[in-house]
Image (spheres, coloured by chain):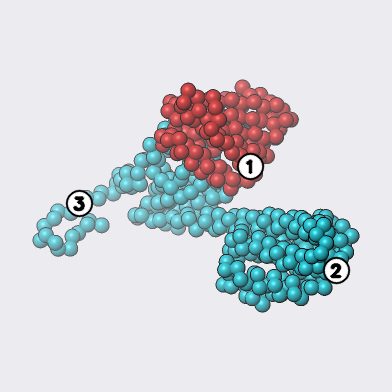
Chain colours: A red, B cyan
Amino acid sequence: MIVISKEKLTIQKEQDVVLFRNRIKELATKIGMSLVNQTKLITAASELVRNMLRYGGGGITHLEIVSKNSIPGVRLIFVDEGPGIKDITLAMKDGYSTGKSLGLGLPGAKRLVNEFDLKSEPGKGTTVTIIRWKNGL
Amino acid sequence: MNKESAAALKGKKKQILENWMANQLKDAALRDDLMSVSELQQQSEEFLSTLLKAFASPNAEDTDSAGYESIHDILSEISITRARQGFSPRETSAYILSLKEVLSQVLEDRFKDETAILYREIISMNKIMDSLSLVTMETYIKGREEVILRQTNEMSEISTPVIRVWEGILALPIIGTLDSARTQVVMEALLEEIVATGSRIAILDISGVPTVDSLVAQHLIKTVSAARLMGAECIISGIRAEIAQTIVHLGIDLTNIYTKATLASALKMSFSMLSIQVSKAAQNGPVGSKQNFGF
Ligand SMILES: Nc1ncnc2c1ncn2[C@@H]1O[C@H](COP(=O)(O)OP(=O)(O)O)[C@@H](O)[C@H]1O
Ligand SMILES: [Mg+2]
């Protein structure tokens, strides 16, 4: 896999979410991603960025256009230095939430993208990486 | 910066101010619609006096030192004000940059036979002015962010109209992002209107909501429950195909909520729920005459 372009966006407040989503839309449009796939990617990203704000105390997002076997895709990396997730298996369960919300963010985001990777260390922070390929199902 | 430079600059204060003002005014970009010349003159004079004093202080090159404190304050004030007034970044940084030019000229005249000193002093002065220029930009951006934030807040208040589409039917077009603060506004407006009109159906149209994630869904579900408590049923309309697919993958359960693709179909559904019959009137008048639309 090669990285074609990369940029960073700091997320500190609610208003940053809209800016972030718009930027993803621009990148996805640039590589010709279909509207349905764009919507899935943006919605997954929205979940993760909200988690980062709410549970991780904000953080940094990396937005990249990548390419594998000459198929382009968008890779997003969410890095926060918050409290981390103690039980990842539990956090990935539908309906599990410590914040009285729907508990669908993490499992839902995973279903909406082609590649999903969650790393977290209690006390250190959380890093989530997702990729949606241009033509991925 | 050495004592001779500071003294030379101080001695030429009047001339510096004059040239600096001329520089600022000659810049075609300066907006006399945003600020009067006398205001600019006064602001510039105050700034220059404070700056020349700081130049004479022992650690003149350290713009974080105490001598520069009030300069930072004045500069921040100027940039914030300019940001709010709608000056461009170029116009705002031109304030410091145009002064730099004038100061260079004075130093050149003072040390024209001592190239080595001139070189050192110019660099030193540039260093100070560049660091002040950064302060200007930082505060300018902060000022712009304030403006944007205020506009965002204003938008969320104005863009939540509740429309009475029919006797007993309300429609609420939601446009933009449905964050927590916005949901509160929308919900309150809707509940008030349900009570005021005794409406039994509320259509929440989300055609204008770009992203429906689990937070937005939760807010919608909450609004529907609150409306039910007030005796009104909700229909969510304007769910585009790609959003419908995404909601399913996310795992959001909307089976307990009426959903429709378009506002028109939601309206039709409301009619049948309220047993309202709307039909086309028989066309018996001559062609071209005023038609009866059956309303
Ligand atoms: N970045 C994060 N830092 C710390 N904890 C997190 C983070 N993201 C998710 N979590 C934990 O995982 C849980 C599940 O997240 P999610 O599936 O998005 O549901 P919800 O946001 O509705 O709680 C959260 O309630 C929280 O406890
Ligand atoms: Mg979440």
Tell me, for residue B7, which label it has, or none. 2
Give how far across and how far down residue B133 sits, in percent. Answer: 70, 58
Of discs 2 and 1, which sits in the foreground? 2
* Residue type, label 3: Lys
Chain under callout 2: B
* Residue type, label 1: Thr
Identify whether B72 is placed above or below A45. below
Between residues B286 and B123, which one lies in front from this camera angle? B123
Answer with the quarter of the image where residue B111 lies: bottom right
- Do circles 3 and 1 both sit on a common chain? no
Report the quarter where the N terminus of chain A lies. top right
SS at badge 2: helix
Can residue A100 be seen in this snapshot?
A: no
Q: Is residue B73 left or right of residue B285?
A: right
Q: Is residue A16 left or right of residue B206?
A: right
Measure the C-alpha gap from mark 3 to mark 1: 57 Å
Number of residues whose C-alpha sits closer than 10 Å to that of mark 1, classed few (under 14), some (14–19) or many (20 or more): some
Number of residues whose C-alpha sits closer than 10 Å to that of mark 2, classed few (under 14), some (14–19) or many (20 or more): some
Give the number of callouts.
3
Measure the C-alpha gap from mark 2 to mark 3: 91 Å
